[in-house]
Image (cartoon, rainbow, N blue to C red):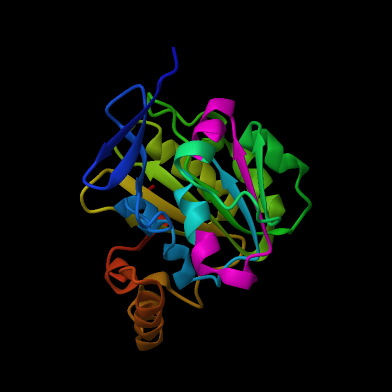
Amino acid sequence: MSDLLISEHNGYRTLHFGSEWVQGRMRIRKPAELSLAYAQEMTAALLFAPPAGNVYVAGLGVGALPRWAFANWGESLKRMDVVELRADVISLAQHSFPLPLDDRRLRIVCDDAAAAIQAKGESTIDWIWVDCYDGRGRVGALESSEFYESCHRAMKKRGVLVANMWSNVPRYRPGLKRLQKVFGDNIALLPSIETENVIMIASKSPLVSGDLATALASPAMRAHARTLTLEYDLPFSKWLSRITGIRSAV
């Protein structure tokens, strides 16, 4: 018996992996909208990097981030590779959570995302999105040093790695330390308000010029956040005050 469960309530369709934990949610009438707060926060890397041309997505779920990217990034998006370990999740998403399958820029493969990225060329990816948990909240090799090193190699100089992490599990701080060994201090953290999710943003290059806290409080960054808020209808300006550097967390 499959552990994939779908529920519908108040105009939303929700995916569960055999537990009460929400794996993803879609507003049925507005499928490109990011319904969950943490999924919205995974776009916060736009504060530091432009819309992506080449995207690697680890974990499909309900396809929220891919749908959002195709709806909002237009022709700037050249290629998106989505790697999902479970064939039944891919099948379910194609039937219940619509994706632009007729778009030649989108490629969905059934594979291990931690292994598949090793085949990517060096310095070829602009954005890497990682949101890949099973029904017990496990993420496996996607928090390993080997995976982070593979991401670093595959990312362009100004590319970003964006991962959904949980701060209430024992592996959180060790995972951040492994990240720091690979990316140094070029890491920003955006903790959610209502949940234990923490969105991690890492880059090969410094995310900002100079001190992160100073840059986030600058008039230029505040103006940039206001522009993004108007363009995407997401609270970039509010996120500024919650973003911290890696040193405050390890």
Q: Residue at x 45, y 39 (%)?
A: 96
Count the numbered circles shown.
0
Q: Residue at x 57, y 47 (%)?
A: 57
Where residue 105 sits: x, y (%)?
A: 68, 57
75, 58: nearer the viewer: 75
- Judged from this view, the residue extending furthest toward the top is 1
Indicate left or right for 163 with 13 as reference. Answer: right
Where residue 64 sits: x, y (%)?
A: 45, 50
Q: Which residues are magenta?
A: 69-93
Q: Is residue 31 magenta?
A: no
Vertical comparison of 221 with 247: above or below = below
Indicate left or right for 244 with 187 as reference. Answer: left
Where residue 201 sits: x, y (%)?
A: 47, 57
Residue 66 seen in this snapshot: yes
Residue 185 seen in this snapshot: no
246, 19: nearer the viewer: 19
Where residue 22 sits: x, y (%)?
A: 32, 36
